Image (tube, grey):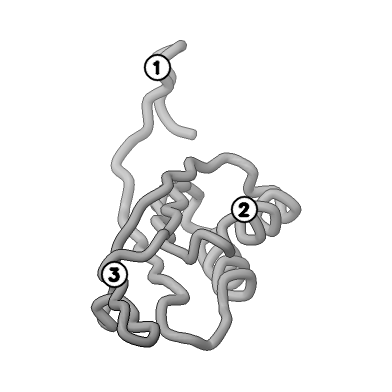
Amino acid sequence: MALKMIKAIVRADAADTVADGLAEAGFASMTKINAFGRGKQKGITVGSIHYDELPRTILLMVVEEGDVEEVLKLIHCKAYTGNFGDGKIFITSVDNAVTVRTGANGL
């Protein structure tokens, strides 16, 4: 069983919508991290004020390789506004996962 880590960086105001959508689809296990950052747009300017770092939420989850496409579609659907700053999704391979309490390997 191949495991993949999905790290989605989304707008802070979209994070709960994304998390709820994933939970409804059966992907309830995740970690949410509040963060600040900027993407290619290097912040945003409103009038004469430039905001260099914007609030973001990082969602981390490990899923089986066969579930990656469904998770990506859900995140995209729930986080999409069509504007700059909607977010970015990273997918990496996971060699192993170990449960601290039991020492068991795998999900």
Horizontally, residue 13 falls left or right of residue 32, namely: right
Q: Residues within 10 Å of mark 2 (few under 14, many from 20)?
A: many
Relative image position of residue 48 (x, y in whole percent): 31, 84
- Which of the two marks, 1 or 2, is nearer to us in this view? 2
Q: Residues within 10 Å of mark 3 (few under 14, many from 20)?
A: some
Quadrant in which the N terminus is drawn: top left
Q: What label does residue 89 carry, if any?
A: none
Report helix, strand or loop for mark 2. Answer: helix
Q: Please, what is the three-letter code of the amino acid marked with disc 3?
A: Arg
Residue occupying image coordinates x 29% and y 42%? 95
Q: What label does residue 38 carry, if any?
A: 3
Q: What label does residue 100 carry, if any?
A: 1
CA separation in Å, label 3 and label 1: 34 Å
Report helix, strand or loop for mark 1. Answer: loop
> Between 16 and 22, which is closer to the camera in this rendering?
16
Q: Earlier in the sequence, mark 3 or mark 2?
A: 2
Report helix, strand or loop for mark 3. Answer: loop
The residue lying furthest to the right in this view is 24
Are the residues flagged by discs 3 and 1 in contact, CB closer than 8 Å?
A: no
Q: Please, what is the three-letter code of the amino acid marked with disc 1?
A: Val
Residue pointed to by mark 2: 19
Relative image position of residue 84 (x, y in whole percent): 42, 84
Relative image position of residue 8 (x, y in whole percent): 43, 60
Are the residues flagged by discs 3 and 2 in contact, CB closer than 8 Å?
A: no
